[in-house]
Image: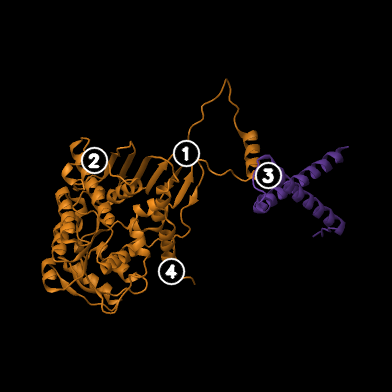
Chain colours: A orange, B purple
Amino acid sequence: MIDKNQNRRDFIKNLALTGSVAALAASPWLSVLADNSITKGPNEQIQIAVIGTGDRGKQLIRHLFEIPGKPNFKLLAICDNFQLHLDNTLELLKEHNCSPKTYTNHLQLLENEKLDAVIIATPLHQHAQIAINCMQSGIHVFCEKAMARNLEDIKRMYDTHIQQNRILQIGHQRLFNPVYLEGMQRIHNGDLGTIGQIRAYWHRNNNWRRSLPNNDKSLERKINWRLYKEYSAGLLTELLSHQIQVAIWALQKTPISVMGTGSIRFWKDGREVNDNIALIYSFEDGTQFVYDSMTSNKKYGLEEQIMGHKGTIEFEVNRQYSETPPAAPGIQQLINNVEHGLFDNLPIGGSSWVPETASKYKGEPIVKTNDLGDTTLELEAFLKFVRAGSAPEKITKEGYNASIWTILGEQAINTGEQLHMPSEFIL
Amino acid sequence: MKDILIKSKRIKKELLYLLVSLALADLLNVISIIVYKSSWKEIFTQLGYVFMIGILFYILSIIIRVLVRVIKSFF
């Protein structure tokens, strides 16, 4: 059986070798990921801790242990201020014969352990202080998206990363997804022509609540922190932040303004964050990023549609569509024509209006494999960056710009105004 | 129960009809390639369609022959 990890590795190496200058400049982490000279060394074991061991933290730990080739790292400690999370994670780690120390306070962790890197997967409002403390202690940081709860904290994180010269990688796993990497190369090579609009959406039909342990109501805000404004901007920081990052990556520029609206339309259950939102981001060249998200209908799921005058890419379904699709085989055209001739209605009294419904052309796959593994790849890249001592600056900027424009989107919804980036936050 | 006997002559005749139907369908494919200026690869890649159309032609031939026989029986 062909090793799927080897396939993925070969794919990325090939992409890094064949990419145009423009395409590689847009995704400079590709060449680091493809560089096999950054390998493990017996005396260079990377000492890691994971801060925040809830659902996402546990997922990241699973992916960490799935990195192919057994990278030389040791999970030295885990930290969470909720004992149940620590216990569940220790249970999970037994499978990997790993028994890290546990901490309930990240400052104690930093004081007691000599770490090379941390992975932060706490609730959003805690990201900034923890990340800053870690970087100030000389530790490289992988932090889940979005970066922070407000613009000031996002900037503080970025500034600390620059001042301390520590890696700050934000968990936008699409940056490492083979479908996105290949698709972005095509976009940056001009295959889609001039991009006029990017549309993205993320629709779910559930209340987004997690069940409370032992139905303990006092844990509501701790477990369901995504639903409360003090800790989260809801759909914006949890979902939009991924998709605005894709738009900024595709266009290689940041928006100039955003306007939006949102409401609690369906889930009137005491939550504070909107259960539906719609936003329009404008770019200097006139391109728009049109976004919506809701939690009471999932027919359309999620998608990012990059629409140029020569073609369209839909990343989530791994498809590219040409504006001039290849003609159907001759025999099928003949059958269609016979069918139309026999069954179509004849217009009476002049030409009739034909509805401009969506093209039925099903497009072509962007990459052939369905094996994405982007979270494993982003963690593999993080370990490589840590070993190399630095990461491409663009990777931090991708996270920064996505987070800044996510929070500006929230402010646009709250104020009902069209907002521009305050000058102090422009990099 | 009455046995139905199918003579070898009849089998040969039906096979001939099927063969002609498939040949006609293949010819239709070639004509389509020329008319719609598509790729000659379609001679092979569209064999599934050709087979289906061939079967359709054969069924049509059966219907026509049955109709002819029914009409003839009235005269």
Decide which of A341, A159 is in the foreground and name it.
A159
Mark closer to the chain start, 4 or 1: 4
From this view, report whether residue A399 is shown above or below residue A82: above
- Which type of secondary structure does the marked residue at label 2 adopt? strand
Farthest residue toward the top? A349
| CB within 8 Å, label 4 to label 3 | no
Q: CA distance from mark 3 to mark 1?
A: 27 Å
Examine the rendering and report whether any part of residue A193 can be seen.
yes
Task: Give percent across and percent down for residue A175.
Answer: 34, 56
Examine the rendering and report whether any part of residue A208 can be seen.
no
Which quarter of the figure has residue A282? top left
Q: Residue at x 86, y 59 (%)?
A: B8
Q: CA distance from mark 4 to mark 1?
A: 39 Å
Task: Give percent across and percent down for residue A159.
Answer: 16, 54
Q: In the rendered image, which residue does mark 4 sit on?
A: A6
Q: Are marks 4 and 2 on the same chain?
A: yes
Q: Are marks 4 and 1 on the same chain?
A: yes
Q: In the rendered image, which residue does mark 2 sit on?
A: A263
Query: Tag 1: residue type?
Result: Ala
Q: In the rendered image, which residue does mark 1 sit on?
A: A358
Q: Residues within 10 Å of mark 4 (few under 14, many from 20)?
A: few
From this view, report whether residue A15 is shown above or below residue A237: below
Q: In the rendered image, which residue does mark 3 sit on?
A: B33
Farthest residue toward the right? B75
Depth check, mark 4 against mark 2: the one in front is 4
Q: How many marks?
A: 4
Mark closer to the chain start, 2 or 1: 2
Query: Tag 2: residue type?
Result: Ser
